[in-house]
Amino acid sequence: MKQTFGKNERLCSPTLIGRLFQRGSADVHTFYLFPFRVLYMYDTTPPLFPQLLFSVSKRQFKKAVDRNQVKRRCREAYRLNKAALLALPPESRPSYIAFLYIAKEISTFDVIESSMKQSVNRLLKLPPALRKNQGQ
């Protein structure tokens, strides 16, 4: 498998992003794993690859250079560790995932990568009942 992060893996649809960030929605689940807040959602017709979104607060990082650096590190950490998530069948893995960077300073790549590994492992260990009941 190629270790790429292409256009088909990026969450670009405004309607899907709106559904993912909708407050009080029963379809969206979340957990915190420093420096990330992870939002994920299942869909009845899952895409071939899980679609991801990486977000860094403009309020915390005023300079676009800093925001882009953090997003670049997050994307790279996911790209290197996504194989375990793709090993699951499409109907049992989250369809849409958002990683919100909540730290107040720029973390090193090692910190981001270890947190990304833990996040992917946590997404793998979701209870089966939670997986089946989503999107219906």
Image (tube, rainbow, N blue to C red):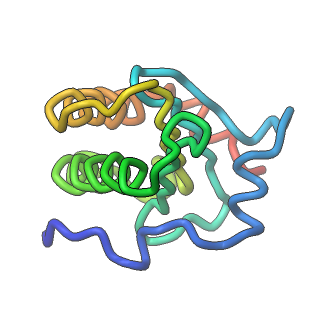
Q: On screen, 45 above or below 102?
A: below
Q: 102 or 16, which lies in front?
A: 102
Which residue is farthest right? Answer: 24
Q: 115 or 132, which lies in front?
A: 115
Report whether 11 appears left or right of 29: left
Name the residue rendered at 23%, 57% in the picture: 79
Residue 84 drawn at (x, y percent) = 23, 46
Residue 54 drawn at (x, y percent) = 47, 52
Q: On screen, 9 above or below 94?
A: below
Report whether 77 appears left or right of 21: left
Name the residue rendered at 46%, 48% in the picture: 93
Residue 39, quarter of picture: top right
Q: How many marks?
A: 0
Q: On screen, 92 above or below 25?
A: below
Residue 113 drawn at (x, y percent) = 21, 36
Name the residue rendered at 29%, 68% in the picture: 5
Which residue is farthest front? Answer: 63
Residue 64 drawn at (x, y percent) = 45, 56
Quadrant of image for the N terminus: bottom left
Name the residue rendered at 63%, 67% in the picture: 45
Q: 30 or 49, which lies in front?
A: 30
Which residue is farthest bottom? Answer: 7
